[in-house]
Amino acid sequence: MYGGFMIITLIMGAIGGLVGKVLQSRMTKYAQTPIQSGVSGKEVAQQMLQHYGIHDVQVVEGQGFLTDHYNPKTKVVSLSPPIYQGQTVAAVAVAAHEVGHAVQHAEAYGFLQMRSAIVPLVQFSSKFQQFALMGAFMTVGAGSTFGDMAMLACIGLFAITALFSLITLPVEFDASKRGLAYIDNAGIVQGEEYTGAKDGLKWAAMTYVAAALSAIVMVLYLVMRFAGNNRRR
Ligand SMILES: [Zn+2]
């Protein structure tokens, strides 16, 4: 069981790493592609919030690269320096995407609410996943009730992670859709600038797709092993 688990972890890790590399290179390129309208990420964020009548969300400058996020608890859109200050394709695309999350929050978008609701469950499950896995590895093939229980615990805990990563997908795709529609309609990007913004956000979404795929494969693998163990008995 351990060998198969390691192979899956490695393959899925490699796919995730590859997608992350593409995202990084695309975003680096688009962060160096200026837009004609000359609007900065900060300005796009503020204008979009205003457009949607949202007055209780702050836009602040964070640190690092690709660390941009919206925090629903503090109602803060945090943009990394190249996004906050930049007047580039990446800056306006990412800023509008993050405000897309703030708009989802303001409109009580269903998938965002579901996602927030299961966060405590995900934190609980990630704490116990490793223990459950160890238990399952140690008791595999023992044919014991304890082995079955450890395996079922594993499946349950990994299923929570998979569910969370699945619910994340519509949340991310929807935020990009809202962001892109805004920067297009407001005339912030034009022609190839829009194509670039769409491409950058597509690769950002792909990292979430890779994570969801990895989580689902993991659950399927555990279920197959569990079924296999019980058939052999
Ligand atoms: Zn997002």
Image (cartoon, rainbow, N blue to C red):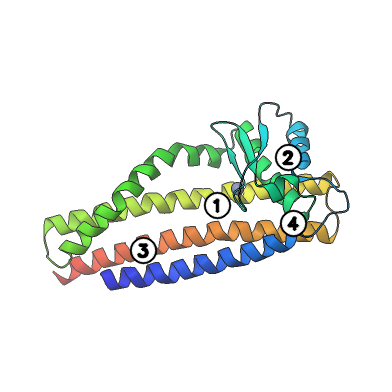
The one nearer the camera, 57 or 31, is: 31
Pinpoint residue 176: horizontal percent, then vertical percent.
67, 50
Left or right: 208 as drawn, with respect to 81 = left
Name the residue located 62 percent from the left edge and 42 percent from the top edge: 62
Label 1 to label 3: alpha-carbon separation: 19 Å
| Quadrant showing the C terminus | bottom left
Label 1 to label 2: alpha-carbon separation: 22 Å
Pointers 2 and 4 in contact (CB under 8 A)?
no
Label 2 to label 4: alpha-carbon separation: 15 Å
Give the amino acid type for the residue marked by disc 2 in the picture.
Ala
User: Which mark is in front, 4 or 1?
Assistant: 4
Which image quarter: residue 137? bottom left
Q: Is residue 167 above or below residue 206?
A: above
Choose the circle earlier in sequence order: 4 or 1: 1
Choose the circle earlier in sequence order: 1 or 3: 1
Give the amino acid type for the residue marked by disc 4 in the picture.
Ala
Residue under numbered circle 4: 197
User: Which mark is in front, 1 or 2?
Assistant: 2
Give the amino acid type for the residue marked by disc 1 in the picture.
Leu
Residue under numbered circle 3: 220
Pointers 3 and 4 in contact (CB under 8 A)?
no
Label 4 to label 1: alpha-carbon separation: 19 Å
Q: Is residue 73 above or below residue 165?
A: above
Left or right: 219 as drawn, with respect to 104 = left
User: Which mark is in front, 3 or 2?
Assistant: 2
Q: Element type at marker 1?
A: helix
Choose the circle earlier in sequence order: 1 or 2: 2
| Quadrant showing the N terminus | bottom left
Choose the circle earlier in sequence order: 3 or 2: 2
Residue under numbered circle 1: 169
Pinpoint residue 123: horizontal percent, then vertical percent.
38, 43
